Image (tube, rainbow, N blue to C red):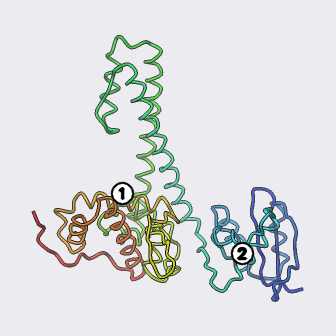
């Protein structure tokens, strides 16, 4: 009995193992508790271990690689078609992982290092805090509006609203107390966000790849840091188009009978990188009249033919392709084709 590939379905406490030999025949099917997993793989002859890519999978991949195994991570959407209908359980999932990894066109996810996951933790917490801060700001505005108090748009204008709440003598004491709690929570979140952003900017300045990416118009230190920490191996993408497709910035296809029909973008892959690229592209679209380069000229020409949002997403796709080129060639962005901006 020679195990050539082992599918591992991970969970919090119980893990399912499905091992196959060179002919694809199942030779091991068993459940393991969390504390049994390291000793089990220590006894196994070195083989290929495949898991679905997730946050915890990178931890187990590093551990099993240290035990001498060849660990590969596969995207969950690539495994789903191989799960037998009506048999969705841990054993079927582990078998489906082996079946998906055995395909000749199977693609795998690079394993992240501890440093990369640590940087991604900063981005994850910052994103969560920004969402909570926005929720509190909206709650404050809604509460104040019930008593006829309003302030201009923008988080920076919340101070004006807080001053109105303090000086309004007609506001009930209970409402003032509720507003003070919300304002205090909003200020605490703003301080935390600022602290995490400083740590992210420090990473962007110290990481060589992030410094290259920050030279792209519309890509700031936060976007550059996130891309550098997320993309462990840029060679996993054969060309720039595949990198843009991985970020979900290419249109859906509904083609048949030789007729090509394109729809909205797929929105697959890393949603946070895609969101930041679109935000950066939005800022550059507003600056297009004064953007003196070939890319700026392309943006101005596209705005004359297409809606603003469509141009913004198309520009985000271009930015993703430029990022792939810089990461592949290890260069910095050099704008070409300086032209005179039209009035």
In the rendered view, does 284 fall on the left or right side of 56?
left
Closer-to-camera residue (169/289): 289
- Residue 335 locus on image (x, y percent): 24, 75
- Identify the image quadrant of the C terminus: bottom left
Res 94 quadrant in image: bottom right
Q: Looking at this rendering, what residue extends furthest in the front direction?
A: 257
Res 81 quadrant in image: bottom right
Closer-to-camera residue (263/113): 263
Badge 2 crowding class, 10 Å Cα cut-off, few under 14, some 14 to 19, many 20 or more, is many
- Residue 75 locus on image (x, y percent): 63, 70
- Identify the image quadrant of the N terminus: bottom right
Res 277 quadrant in image: bottom left
In the rendered view, does 14 fall on the left or right side of 128?
right
Badge 1 crowding class, 10 Å Cα cut-off, few under 14, some 14 to 19, many 20 or more, is some
Q: Which SS class for mark 1? A: helix
Q: Which SS class for mark 2? A: strand
Number of numbered discs overlaid on the protein picture: 2
Up the image or down, 50 lies above or below 89; here it is below
Closer-to-camera residue (38/316): 316
Closer-to-camera residue (169/281): 281
The residue pinned by badge 1 equals: 279
- Residue 280 locus on image (x, y percent): 34, 60
> Closer to us: mark 1 or mark 2?
1
Q: Earlier in the sequence, mark 1 or mark 2?
A: 2
Mark 1 and mark 2: span between their CA atoms?
A: 36 Å
Up the image or down, 220 lies above or below 337; here it is above
The residue pinned by badge 2 equals: 50
């Amino acid at each position: 009995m020679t195990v050539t590939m082992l599918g591992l379905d991970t969970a919090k406490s119980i893990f399912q193992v499905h091992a196959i030999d060179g002919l694809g025949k199942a030779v091991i099917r068993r459940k393991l508790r969390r504390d049994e997993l390291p000793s089990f793989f220590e006894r196994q002859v070195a083989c290929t271990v495949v898991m679905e890519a997730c946050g915890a999978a990178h931890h187990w991949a590093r551990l099993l690689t240290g035990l001498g195994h060849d660990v590969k991570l596969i995207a969950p959407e690539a495994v789903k078609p191989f799960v037998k209908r009506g048999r969705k359980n841990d054993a079927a999932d582990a078998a489906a992982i082996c079946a998906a990894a055995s395909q000749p066109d199977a693609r795998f996810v690079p394993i992240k290092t501890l440093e990369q996951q640590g940087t991604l933790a900063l981005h994850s917490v910052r994103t969560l805090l920004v969402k909570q801060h926005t929720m509190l700001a909206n709650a404050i505005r809604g509460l104040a509006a019930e008593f006829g108090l309003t302030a201009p748009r923008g988080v920076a204008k919340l101070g004006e609203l807080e001053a109105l709440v303090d000086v309004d003598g007609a506001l009930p004491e209970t409402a003032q107390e509720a507003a003070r709690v919300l304002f205090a929570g909003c200020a605490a979140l703003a301080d935390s966000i600022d602290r995490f952003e400083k740590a992210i900017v420090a990473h962007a300045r110290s990481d060589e790849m992030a410094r290259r990416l920050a030279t792209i118009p519309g890509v700031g230190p936060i976007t550059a840091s996130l891309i550098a920490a997320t993309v462990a191996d840029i060679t996993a993408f054969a060309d720039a188009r595949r990198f843009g497709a991985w970020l979900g910035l290419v249109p859906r296809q509904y083609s048949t009978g030789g007729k090509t029909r394109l729809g909205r973008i797929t929105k697959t892959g890393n949603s946070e990188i895609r969101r930041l690229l679109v935000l950066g592209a939005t800022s550059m679209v507003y600056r297009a009249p004064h953007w003196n380069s070939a890319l700026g000229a392309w943006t101005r020409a596209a705005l004359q033919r297409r809606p603003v949002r469509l141009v913004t997403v198309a520009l985000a796709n271009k930015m993703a392709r430029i990022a792939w080129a810089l990461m592949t060639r290890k260069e910095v962005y050099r704008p070409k084709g300086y032209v005179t901006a039209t009035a």
